[in-house]
């Protein structure tokens, strides 16, 4: 009777897993990615047509088995779906691999061939192996990633099959055979064969996705060590032979297609060098904050919800204790699977690329399920059902939206092609692409001239283009960030009034969790007219630019920071702000402003307070001379004669004809700050902070956006905005705010162009034990802009200062298919 029950349970469980795989297929096959999205997917698609990893078709290590499968599918499917279909198919097969893996680990612990029982002698309503398989496949990151034209879920599926076979071998060699020598021999032979098959599948898995080496070989080693004393030497030799055979299946065509081992190794070394130098990884940028962010990326974001992610981690922690009591071999095997990959992932992979966390989802899922199972039969069923339903509640709709919308880069390419085919006015625009987009569009035929591409200094290419006298507009395709600037802040180095946004391309949902790290991600299409000014050297107009300038050498202290300014004979206003960064007690720094080599102004700045903001009106404008641009330079030199180098920065700059408003941050404002992970710029005010305006001829609107004071204080802050003696705005502020405050021209005239923001609450982080920061912090501002009241929102007249470094207001010119 017991044997019959076991067979029935196995049949029932197999039916449940088969149903899970079929549901996975039915809900994914109609919604496979409609376009290529990531640079990696483009490289894979190029490899389908011309496999050559030495030319990044695809990038090393090459993924030869997936490319071979993609070539086969490309006979009937478009490139994106020829790749995505294997993620769907192997994702469905992963249901069987995971079920086998978890069930085999349990049997290896008990030494039995049957199901896991709950101590009552009754079979559970739901086996933990089935429950963990369902939780894993329904995890939002796994579910959505299966439809992407990438290697992640395809590799995950093959890894699951390899791990399942290896775990089955572990279970077979640990099964109790009683006194029956023949049965024991049969189990030994069976376990050996499973080891050989697992070794072969492990090699194939590496040919699908190279990270499989960290997920399969440690488990293979664990099974071999566990076999000690039971023909382990023969198993080791056989496993090695079959692993080598499986490796040769894909390694030989890989090297032949790459032009030999030398060519492949050179390409692999180049790729690894770029990844090591360009990537922000824990191995090269270690810190507790970075580790915490990486752990969140790895264990929270795959569930697309902080609440669900935390709940899963809590359950997984409980599951560890459950296995410590009654499943130590299972726990050891899980650790053999998880620890090597986790260490590799956290140290050497960019964890914001959340898809890299997929291999760790099954471990968390299984541990969580074991915690639920320890509470009883019904908690396991109800808990598993709740996790699956919560995971699926929004993920399927996101999958459909992902399929329907296509990637931003593909939509932009379609619109650009249609716009070009419709005819262009003279002068014809020139393309300027972000580095990621230029790689993603490799092989595309673009019927427009294009500027060279630099990964981090595209503004320098634009400056060279216009300095040579070109009057062509530039169609600038860039990756935006929440700061309002492009990813590398090139736009901050160019006159903001020279640009208008044509169209924006976004994912249909927040991509952070489920599409984290996709390159290129969201995109903006700007048209840049020949500007009024542009920097030739790296300044410190944003913290990101400041870091780049520090790395490349600060031009300000090496002969002068150069700014090209368009020649004009009408009056212009100039605003310049910066800082002496020396420590207290060190010499003052002399700043000198020169135009075409002739000094216009010079002033000294002491290290305390170090900050300065100066403005000028030049009635004669820029003046005549050779070429369309004059060269304005800003130098910083130490006052004493000790031969020291100045430590200084230019943080604010603008130059506009009279009548075009300029806005700057004066006394009472702290330096700009930046979170590169979120792409957010902000600036703290003190208790009283002054905004300086120039060129305002009429009434205007001051727009202020910031964070809730109650994030930093126990209660609301009383905020007052005034110009001279006139109060323009006053309110008790508790939540986030986005104000549009009318500013009469008469009030600005009375105040000399000064607007003051005051708050009744400030704090010093040092007093709260948060850091050594002694600044008095009042309001945390995310954006401040000044717009003429007669034409709010027009890029020609609005001005956004320092927080967004001149980011323009946007007046989209929608294309027929933009944003679909």
Image (cartoon, rainbow, N blue to C red):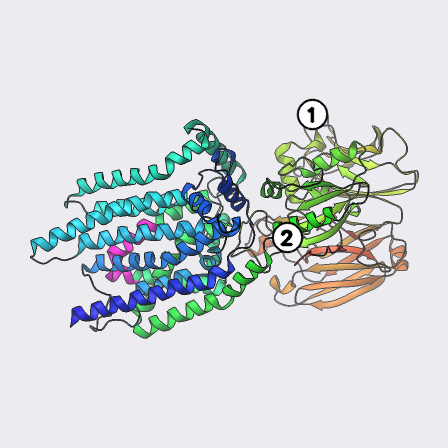
Q: Residue 284, can we see it?
A: yes
Quick check: marks 1 and 2 in contact, CB under 8 Å? Answer: no
Task: Tell me the residue at 20%/50% (across/down).
Answer: 191
Q: Quadrant of the N terminus?
A: bottom left
Distance CA(mark 1)–CA(mark 2): 59 Å
- Whether residue 337 appears in magenta in the rendering, the answer is yes
Position of residue 576 measured from the top left corner of the image (x, y, whole percent): 78, 42
The magenta span reads: 322-338
Q: Nearer the viewer, mark 1 or mark 2?
A: 2
First of labels 1, 2 by sequence position: 2
Q: Is residue 594 left or right of residue 582?
A: right
- Report the residue at 45% width, 57% height from top: 142
Q: Is residue 532 above or below residue 93?
A: above
Position of residue 468 measured from the top left corner of the image (x, y, whole percent)? 79, 31
**Image check: 617 left or right of 765?**
right
- Camera sees residue 313: no
């Amino acid at each position: 009777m017991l044997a019959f029950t076991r067979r029935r349970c196995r049949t029932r469980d197999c039916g449940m897993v088969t149903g899970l795989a079929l549901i996975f297929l039915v809900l994914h096959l109609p919604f496979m990615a409609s376009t290529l999205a990531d640079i990696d997917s483009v490289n894979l698609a190029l490899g389908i047509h011309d496999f050559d990893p030495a030319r990044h078709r695809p990038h090393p290590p090459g993924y030869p088995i997936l490319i071979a499968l993609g070539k086969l599918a490309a006979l009937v499917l478009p490139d994106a779906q020829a790749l995505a279909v294997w993620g769907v198919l192997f994702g469905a097969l992963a249901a069987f691999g995971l079920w086998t893996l978890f069930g085999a680990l349990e049997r290896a612990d008990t030494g039995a061939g049957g199901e896991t029982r709950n101590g009552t002698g009754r079979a559970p309503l739901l086996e933990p192996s089935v429950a963990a398989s369902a939780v894993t496949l329904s995890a939002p990151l796994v579910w959505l990633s299966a439809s992407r034209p990438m290697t992640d879920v395809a590799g995950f599926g093959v890894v699951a099959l390899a791990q399942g076979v290896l775990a089955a071998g572990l279970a077979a060699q640990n099964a109790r055979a009683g006194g029956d020598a023949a049965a024991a021999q049969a189990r030994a032979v069976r376990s050996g064969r499973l080891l050989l098959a697992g070794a072969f599948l492990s090699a194939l898995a590496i040919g699908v996705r190279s990270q499989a080496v960290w997920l399969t070989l440690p488990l293979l080693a664990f099974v071999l060590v566990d076999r000690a004393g039971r023909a382990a030497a023969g198993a080791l030799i056989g496993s090695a032979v079959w692993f080598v055979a499986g490796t040769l299946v894909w390694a030989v065509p890989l090297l032949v297609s790459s032009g030999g081992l030398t060519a492949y190794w050179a390409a692999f070394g180049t790729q690894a060098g770029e990844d090591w130098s360009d990537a922000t990884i824990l191995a090269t940028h270690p810190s507790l904050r970075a580790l915490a962010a990486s752990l969140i990326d790895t264990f929270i974001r795959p569930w697309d919800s902080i609440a669900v992610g935390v709940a899963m981690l809590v359950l997984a922690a409980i599951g560890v204790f459950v296995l410590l009591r009654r499943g130590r071999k299972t726990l050891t095997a899980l650790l053999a699977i998880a620890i090597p990959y986790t260490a590799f992932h956290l140290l050497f992979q960019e964890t914001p690329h959340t898809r890299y966390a997929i291999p760790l989802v099954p471990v968390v899922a299984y541990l969580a399920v074991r915690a639920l199972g320890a509470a009883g039969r019904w908690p396991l069923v109800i808990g598993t059902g709740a996790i699956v339903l919560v995971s699926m509640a929004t993920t399927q709709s996101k999958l459909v939206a992902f399929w329907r919308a296509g990637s931003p880069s593909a939509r932009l390419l379609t619109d650009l092609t249609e716009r070009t085919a419709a005819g262009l006015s003279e002068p014809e625009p020139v393309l300027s692409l972000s580095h990621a987009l230029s790689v993603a569009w490799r092989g595309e035929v673009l019927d427009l001239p294009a500027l060279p591409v630099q990964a981090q200094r595209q503004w320098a290419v634009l400056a060279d283009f216009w300095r040579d006298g070109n009057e062509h507009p530039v169609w600038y395709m860039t990756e935006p960030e929440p700061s309002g600037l492009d990813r590398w802040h090139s736009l901050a180095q160019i006159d903001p009034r020279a640009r208008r946004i044509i169209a924006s391309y976004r994912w249909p949902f927040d991509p952070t969790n489920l599409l984290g790290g996709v390159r290129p991600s969201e995109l903006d299409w700007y048209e840049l007219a020949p500007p009024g000014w542009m920097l030739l050297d790296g300044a410190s107009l944003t913290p990101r630019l400041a870091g780049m300038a520090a790395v490349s050498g600060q031009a300000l202290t090496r002969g002068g920071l150069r700014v090209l300014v368009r020649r004009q004979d009408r009056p212009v206003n100039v605003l310049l702000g910066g800082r002496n960064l020396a420590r207290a007690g060190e010499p003052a720094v002399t700043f000198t402003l020169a135009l075409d080599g002739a000094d216009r102004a010079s002033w000294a700045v002491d290290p305390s307070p170090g900050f300065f903001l100066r403005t000028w009106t030049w009635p004669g404008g820029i003046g005549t001379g050779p070429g369309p641009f004059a060269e304005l330079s800003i130098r910083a030199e130490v006052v004493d004669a000790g031969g020291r180098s100045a430590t200084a920065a230019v943080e604010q700059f603008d130059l506009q004809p009279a009548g075009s408003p300029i806005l700057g941050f004066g006394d009472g404002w702290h330096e700009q700050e930046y979170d590169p992970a979120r792409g957010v710029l902000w600036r703290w005010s003190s208790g009283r902070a002054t905004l300086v305006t120039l060129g305002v001829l009429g009434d205007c609107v001051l727009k202020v956006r910031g964070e809730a004071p109650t994030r930093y204080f126990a209660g609301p802050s009383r905020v007052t905005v005034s110009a001279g003696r006139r109060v323009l705005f006053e309110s008790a502020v508790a939540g986030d705010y986005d104000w549009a405050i009318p500013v009469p021209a008469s009030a600005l005239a009375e105040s000399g162009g000064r607007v003051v923001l005051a708050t009744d609450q400030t704090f010093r982080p040092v007093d709260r034990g948060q850091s050594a920061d002694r600044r008095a912090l009042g309001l945390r501002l995310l954006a401040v802009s000044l717009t003429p009241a007669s034409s709010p929102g027009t890029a020609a007249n609005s001005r956004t200062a320092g927080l967004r470094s001149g980011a323009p207001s946007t007046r989209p010119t929608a294309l027929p298919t933009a944003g679909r």
